[in-house]
Image: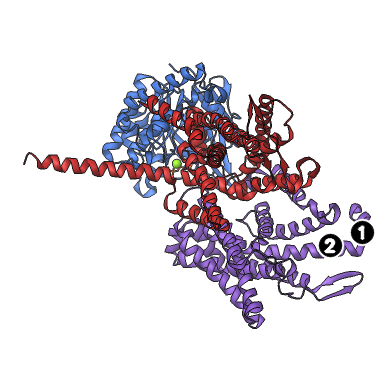
Chain colours: A purple, B blue, C red
Amino acid sequence: MPAVLAVGSLGNTLQVILGGLATGGLYAVLLLGVIVVFQVSKNVNFAYGELGVIGAFVGYVLYSTLHWPTPLALALGVAAAVVLAAVTDLTLIRRIPDRQGFDLVVTLGALLLLTAGTDVVFGSADRQYLNLFSDKARIVGGVYINAGDLLSLGLGLVALVGGHLIVNETGLGVSLRASAEDPAIARSMGIDVLSLRTAVWAASGLLAAVASMVIASRLVLDARYMTPVIINVFIAGMLGGLDRYWPPMLAAFGVGLYNSLAGYIFGSDASTPALFILVLAVLIIAPKRFLEERHEARA
Amino acid sequence: MTQARLTVEDLTVRYGALQAVRDISATFQPDSIVGLIGPNGAGKTTLLNALSGFTDITSGRVRLGERDITRLSGQARVALGIVRSFQTVRLLEDESVFLNVALGCERNPQPTVVEQIFSLPRQWRARRRDLAATYQILDTLGLSEFAGRAVAELPYATRRLVELARILVVHPEVVLLDEPAAGSDRAERDLMGRTLRQLHAREPFTMIVVEHDVDVVRKLCSYAIALDSGAMIASGEPDVVLENDRVQEAYFGVGHRA
Amino acid sequence: MRIAASIVVMAFVGLLPFALDSYWVFTLSEVMIYAIATIGLDIVFGRAGQLSLAQASFFGLGAYLAALTTTLPAGLQFLLVVATAMIAGAVVAIPTLRLSGLRLALVTLLFGELFIWALDHLGSLTGGTQGLVVPALAIGDSNSQDPTYGYMLVLFFAVAATLTAVQISRTQFGRRLLAVRDSEVAARSVGIGLVRTKVAAFMLSAIFAGVAGWLYAHVVGFVAPPTFDLFPSVYFLIAVILGGAGRVAGSWLGAAYIVLIPQAFSIIGQSNLFPILGGGVLILVALLLPGGLMDGATRTAGWIRARYAAMRQMSSNRRPA
Ligand SMILES: Nc1ncnc2c1ncn2[C@@H]1O[C@H](COP(=O)(O)OP(=O)(O)OP(=O)(O)O)[C@@H](O)[C@H]1O
Ligand SMILES: [Mg+2]
């Protein structure tokens, strides 16, 4: 803490913390999508962020080029991402051969395809996105509070609590895990595994689109703006473990906060090495059990 | 050939609240064939895991001869000649039978990676030695005709033999077999039993076999150990152990008691 | 027979630069350079199954070392590249030993990000985002940036890399790699040291990539960060998967694809279409031909042979009748 105080005033520090938590909230929204997909299908989607980018772009084109009403444009953007996510599951994920790492390879291919496709279709210029409240701000007790930050933080908290209720407190969570653990047993329990998976993928598309729109309003819109964001989200998932719930979701807030504090203390240039150091430190100190991801059935 | 005697003293393996193996003491005489029997979940596989270093031992000791190997890693135990098979075969499914068996040559002293890559003289000798050993065991087990085939294409009983060949390609001290005939039909079971007896007669080693088939245990083993709920409930001559009341009860339940 | 065939192929490849114009000679050199790095990735990913997204970083490490040590004699440069790549490979491998799948991919990706970050931020040394011009390496009375000489230089290392990869398939080390990939339980049960095998695989793969990068800098004469970031790492992955994991000829095929196809696109003025094709190809090959093109070719050849044999059989059965 003294280091922080040495750099700036208490107000600045609080503001950095608020900004970090807001970013973390968006990470949490995104991570919730990653977690449910992982829990239902044991797959990770590298192209996840790109689904959101496309949703954001569709919304952008509808309101800024075609001048449709903003809420309708954004809703259709979200719908586009939902459809695309479901299509990804239907056309790609279901056909992945049963070899280690091939889900990563296929979704890396999808990342490449969608990123380049977005570049070609929408052009590679940076665009200013809708403001989504990030232009509304008020100073409370020396702290500059941005409504966009509050929106992000709120979304994050909704994802955190809503996700908890869905994953841990309802039958749906049980169905998810049953489908991933043993599809045959899940089927005998009356779960339609394939439809459930597609539905979960679709839901992840929704989360990706919402978060991507808010992030676009804070940054700029281009084909790649989600890539660094999604790397941070995956890192939070990796630190917490995708087969759990609270540790990764809290790690999402933690990574957001850590990044913004590191940026504040060492300059925004330092965020890459700072994150790297965090990951290495966790890898070195984490117990073995924590890091085992893919168990071969025991001997 | 084998000299060292494998002993376990008060061996316990715990998984959380579950005692998968509790307080087992036994001596496996050199070159004997010991049958390990017991109902599902009795702890047979766990005992093999404890002997081969595939699970942590909660308390007790394992010795090979005078040497305490309780804390040795699985890798170190393999180096001492303790090798095992698995209840479900573990093979490189997409690779050839030959490659899978040659993998077992790891127990021969291997040249360094640099020597291997640059094909230095030690590598030539090692390669010649390993190829010869692999072809020989393939021949012994009647697998030569499959040498170039991918394991995944073969019937289950043949894949069991491939796993066995991988274990035996370099002469072992102690062989731990986990249900070597599981998933085989009557004829294949008998064949596996006979094959094991022949191999053992040719070049003896200590063999511990988990086996449910009473006939196979009778014909193959010189000694039997029965487990139930992790504890040893009987040991001795196979015939005696198989007739033991507690063993009968464990297998068939109280109702069937004579 | 095989020896004779090899001699013919080598003679053909050796004479090629005298038959082509210098642009194509240069392009072929590039294919060979990428083949060396792809063979390296094939060792750690194709054979040992460790998904690494840092291959372009090792490639870049070799390239920047070349750029920064132009005053040293070539032999010394080479040794320095090998030693540094070995260390870098171990540095990436050791913290990631306990990881697999997504986590391994992510951490190797982070190593790559860190490398690019360092290039950008050590501007006085590395030229930052502007990159560095690399003076040609003198070889006898010519230099590495002369297309024909450059080609010969690269050819020498490409042949060495290919032979090394083939030799690895014939060794116990090669079998260890496959065991680590396919079944760690089986690997442990025969006494294979997982840690040592994984670290060795990473180190070897880094050496291949480092040497390839070193050649790249000397032949191309210019190094800049985009050549070494995440996207090229994914392209190396595409090359391995497209050609077929664990197959040296596959690595060559994959390298030819990632060098020649983008060139073809830029010739028709559509260079931004290549990543779309790249992504599509990666998906299609992974879904439809998980063994890669080489595997597909082997299967097709086997199928044709079987059909041919069956036809022969039929006609020979018919004849006596
Ligand atoms: N790694 C482990 N973690 C937790 N529990 C385990 C583990 N390995 C075995 N167990 C438990 O220990 C008990 C004994 O299992 P074990 O596999 O040794 O039985 P077994 O005698 O081999 O049975 P089977 O005939 O079915 O193969 C079982 O209840 C099993 O669920
Ligand atoms: Mg068992």
What residue is drawn where x is 48% and y is 53%?
Answer: C281
Q: Is residue B205 above or below residue C58?
A: above
Q: Could you say whether the residue bearing mark 1 is in a helix, strand or loop?
A: loop
Q: Position of residue C313 (x, y in %)?
A: 17, 40
- Chain to which the residue tagged by mark 2 belongs: A
Q: Seen in the image, is A171 located left or right of residue B160?
A: right
Mark 1 chain: A
Q: Which residue is mark 2?
A: A16
Q: Is residue B224 visible?
A: no
Q: In whole angstroms, how far apart are the C-alphas of marks 2 and 1? A: 10 Å
Q: Is residue A94 above or below residue A159?
A: above
The residue singled out by tag 1 in the image is A8
In which image quadrant can residue B249 be found? top left
Dots 2, 1 in contact, CB < 8 A: yes
Looking at the image, residue B87 sits to the left or right of residue A7; the answer is: left
Q: Is residue C312 left or right of residue A224?
A: left
- Which sits earlier in the primary sequence, circle 2 or circle 1? 1
Q: Nearer the viewer, residue A65 or A244?
A: A65
**Front in this rendered view, residue B211 or A128:** A128
Q: Three-letter amino acid code at disc 1?
A: Gly
